[in-house]
Amino acid sequence: MYKFLLFIHVFAAIAMLGPTYLLPALMRMRGDPPSVTVLRVEYLIGRYATAFTVVALATGAGLMSTSPLVNDRVSEAVWLHIAITLFLIVAGLGTGFAGPRMKKALKAGEAGDAAEVRRLLDPLDKVVGPIMGLLTAVILYLMLMKPEF
């Protein structure tokens, strides 16, 4: 069961993360006024990332309960606690901030309101997106290297 959960967990992480690294390129492709097609692609990437985040969270919980690496020593795996905390921050930013803004920006783009699209996505493009990318890189490092603290 452990190896199956590990496969699904890693697959979900790849499926979740891979497309999100297209977002900076798509951001530059939006144009002025913002292309509704590009906004739709960005929105879909966000939706899929959210779905795979749920899968990664569920399989991660299963891995913690079946892992030979942390079995009976979960409280000692500091790297895991840090990674989980960062994951919850990224998931919260994605589902509670980025997702709703992207949905509103898409609606504004479909209505032809370029100024509203820029107002909604500017904080995402300049602050939240880069923070999420950095935190995700730290999570990946922690999960792969499992450093001893």
Image (cartoon, helix red, strand yellow):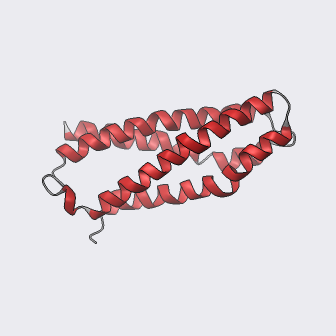
The answer to whether residue 28 is seen in the rendering is yes
Residue 101, how many percent across, how many down? 66, 40
- Which residue is most to the front? 96
The answer to whether residue 19 is seen in the rendering is no
- Left or right: 149 in relation to 107: left
Residue 80, how many percent across, how many down? 30, 57
Residue 146, how many percent across, how many down? 30, 62
- Left or right: 102 in relation to 18: right
Quadrant assignment, res 148: bottom left
Nearer to me, 108 or 5: 108
Q: Residue at x 28, y 72 (%)?
A: 149
Quarter of the image with the N terminus in it: top left
Residue 96, how many percent across, how many down? 55, 42
Q: Residue at x 31, y 62 (%)?
A: 79
Q: How many marks?
A: 0
- Left or right: 28 in relation to 33: left
Q: Residue at x 47, y 39 (%)?
A: 15
- Which residue is most to the left? 72
Q: Residue at x 48, y 45 (%)?
A: 91
Nearer to me, 19 or 57: 57
